[in-house]
Image (tube, rainbow, N blue to C red):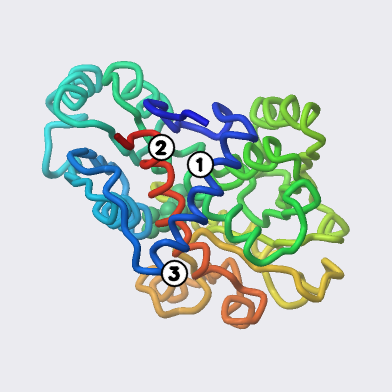
Amino acid sequence: MNLKGRSFLTLMDYTAEEIRYLLDLAKKLKADRAAGIYGDSLRGRNILLLFDKTSTRTRSSFEVGATQEGGSVTFLDKSSSQFGKKESIEDSAKVFGRIYDAIEYRGYEQSVVEALAEHSGVPVYNGLTDVDHPTQILADLMTIEEHIDKPLSKVKVVFCGDTRNNMAYAWMYGCAKMGMAFVAYGPEELAPDPAVMKGASAVAAETGATIEFSQASAALAGADAVYSDIWASMGEEEQIPERVRLLTPYKVTMDLLERTGNPDVLFMHCLPSFHDFETELAKSQRELGYDIREVTDEVFRSRHSVVFDEAENRMHTIKALMVATLAR
Ligand code: CP
Ligand code: NVA
């Protein structure tokens, strides 16, 4: 498998075999790290980490993943660069392409990550946009394979909550590609964009996957994994009151997990998560009368929860992506 020089803007650009290759490489790199073995396949490679939104896991994974393979990174954001303020995306992309070997970008419109790829001439990795979060799905698929003893094509994932956000769409693409069963379980008001459903369904028709949107709790039956995400994504904070009203019925509770009928169902979450009132935002919203917890603390800390495995696997999968596309 040769992925050298390839960008990673969405899973829709990758075949099932290419995704399989990245997952297997990530497993190998994880085992190597556990054995104290580090490669140097990124030696001399300089990777730009460009962030228009904040990050804990994604930035850390790119930084540590690159460093462990001998590469180096530069972090830039709006406050510390001209990007998006005094220089067009096209001009910045051309400059970055002259200096760096690859670019990671996190921000708002998908068109920005696409323009960076078009104009830089180097591999560009999507570290999250308003409509996609493909590196998160690599980590989540890897985590599912570590915990569920059956092929991905037999696995059912139910995403609970804001079914028109970046995670819901990334899951649709991931499940469609890997032949999995996917249900977006959320209110009609936050229904997925029909164009996204259509695109994922067209792939699903070829791979045997199923992609559904449902408000019926019966859709939870037989789930192998219940996935949740925050109700108001980065940049949507002013919509919290409306989201609490629409999404409280889709909060992940023990009762919701029981409705899957699967005593060993996994609880998954990309993180960060509101599962208690230990964060500034959850506290301040509670004072205003809004409970923004998308999952109960009981579920989050239960034996079902694999959220910190997912977080660790961000690093292994992102490292695999860089090695596959950039190694000497
Ligand atoms: N899951 C995820 O992308 O986390 P960060 O926002 O911390 O990068
Ligand atoms: N939907 C969330 C995902 C965070 C990883 C957001 O965009 O804020």
Please say whether residue 152 is visible from this viewpoint.
yes
Local secondary structure at mark 3:
helix
Q: Is residue 169 shown above or below 283? A: above
Q: Nearer the viewer, mark 1 or mark 3?
A: 1
| x, y percent for residue 37 | 34, 62
The reply to whether dot 2 and dot 1 touch (C-beta < 8 Å) is yes
In the image, which disc is placed on residue 285? 3
Displayed quadrant of residue 52: top left
Q: Which mark is residue 52?
A: none
| Distance of label 2 from label 3 (alpha carbons) | 31 Å
Callout in the foreground (2, 3)? 2
Q: Is mark 3 within 8 Å of ligand 2?
A: no
Query: Would residue 237 be seen by someone viewing this image from the given angle?
Result: no
Residue, x 35% and y 31% (percent of image)? Answer: 124
Marked residue nearer the N-terminal end (2 or 1)? 2
Report crowding for label 3: few under 14, some 14 to 19, many 20 or more residues within 10 A (C-alpha): some
Residue matched to label 2: 126
Q: Compute the Cα span from label 1 to label 3.
A: 30 Å
Specify the quadrant that holds the C terminus: top left
Looking at the rendered structure, the secondary structure element under dot 1 is helix
Residue bearing mark 1:
134
> Which residue is rendered at x = 34% and y = 68% of the image?
36
**Residue displayed at 35% across by 72% down:** 280
